[in-house]
Image (cartoon, rainbow, N blue to C red):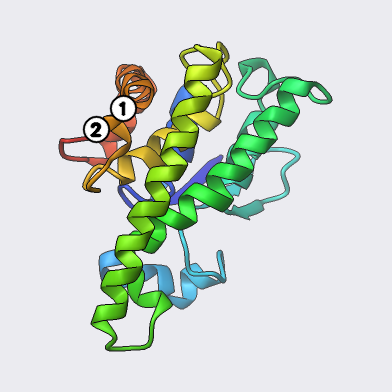
């Protein structure tokens, strides 16, 4: 059995979508951030970072594997279900390109967006002016990064981040673009990204995830 530790609309959203795409039996375990359960001793024993998501894989051959980090979980799900085609074949240029964009999503765009939501982490306690400036600059940086992402869709002209092939990158990209929905210049303002988000919002697996997590509109 696969167990996904999640909280609605958090970074667990992308693995949740992929599990639904795969049609696997899995267990959702709510870690209530509103009650600081992600900082509890029980959860810190699973992910000492105190962050979501985390995944436990007790299927045969997985030895009770515990993973954290969204990108790592997505790769694990793709690699343990190669017939689903959620990543290009190993050793191919397409696979290398997928790694490039997956690392970019997790190392570049995601930290920028998170900075917007948690600006106080980057200033001294009580520095409200500094916090506001950090938040403003996060939006500036995010806009430039979203432009770059949109340019990739425009370059290849395909419906998904890798072109014609749907992959684990697409729920991840959707999730991060969704997080910008209240920005002054959200992802949906870019025609290529707006169209991508509309396409993704029609996928049954994503709709099922939204329904399960009870996410209100606007979704992006």
Q: Which numbered dot is residue 137? A: none
Residue 35 position in % (x across, y down): 27, 70
Say which residue appears at 27% left-offset and 31% top-offset: 189
Q: Nearer the viewer, residue 141 or 13?
A: 141
Measured from the top left, where is residue 168 in percent x and y?
Answer: 55, 30
Check disc 2: other Cα within 10 Å, few if <14, some if 14-19, many if 20+: few
* Residue closest to the far bottom: 125
Quarter of the rendering containing residue 103: top right
Per the model, the C-alpha gap separating discs 2 and 1 is: 5 Å
The crowding category of the residue bearing disc 1, from other C-alpha atoms within 10 Å (few below 14, some 14 to 19, many at least 20), is some
> Is the residue 207 above or below the residue 64 in the image?
above
Q: Looking at the image, which residue sits at the far right?
A: 91
Residue plotted at (33% across, 28% down): 190
Q: Is residue 131 visible?
A: yes
Pick the front one: 43 or 108: 108
Which residue corresponds to mark 2?
Answer: 211
Asked if marks 2 and 1 touch (Cβ < 8 Å), the reply is yes
Q: Residue at x 48, y 48 (%)?
A: 109
Residue 162 at what x, y percent from top left? Answer: 58, 21
Q: Is residue 63 above or below residue 15?
A: below
Q: Secondary structure at mark 2?
A: helix
Look at mark 1 in the image and give the residue it sits on. 208
Q: Is residue 211 left or right of residue 83?
A: left
The answer to which image quadrant residue 178 occupies is top left
């Amino acid at each position: 059995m696969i167990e996904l530790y999640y909280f609605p609309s958090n970074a667990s959203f992308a693995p949740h979508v992929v599990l639904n795409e795969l049609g696997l039996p899995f267990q959702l375990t709510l870690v209530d951030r509103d009650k600081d359960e992600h900082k509890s001793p029980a959860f810190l024993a699973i992910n000492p970072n105190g962050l979501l998501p985390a995944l436990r894989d007790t299927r045969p051959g997985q030895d009770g594997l515990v993973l954290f980090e969204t990108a790592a979980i997505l790769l694990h799900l793709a690699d343990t279900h190669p017939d689903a085609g959620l990543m290009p074949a190993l050793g191919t240029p397409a696979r290398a390109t997928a790694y490039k964009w997956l690392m970019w999503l997790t190392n570049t765009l995601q930290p920028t967006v998170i900075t917007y939501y948690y600006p106080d982490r980057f200033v001294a306690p009580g520095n409200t002016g500094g916090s506001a400036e950090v938040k403003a600059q996060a939006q500036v940086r995010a806009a430039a990064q979203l432009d770059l992402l949109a340019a990739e869709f425009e370059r290849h002209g395909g419906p998904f981040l890798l072109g014609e092939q749907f992959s684990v990158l697409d729920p991840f990209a959707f999730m991060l673009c969704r997080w910008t929905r209240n920005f002054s210049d959200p992802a949906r303002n870019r025609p290529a990204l707006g169209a991508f988000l509309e396409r993704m919002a029609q996928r049954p697996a994503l709709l099922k995830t939204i329904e399960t997590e009870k996410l209100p509109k606007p979704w992006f």
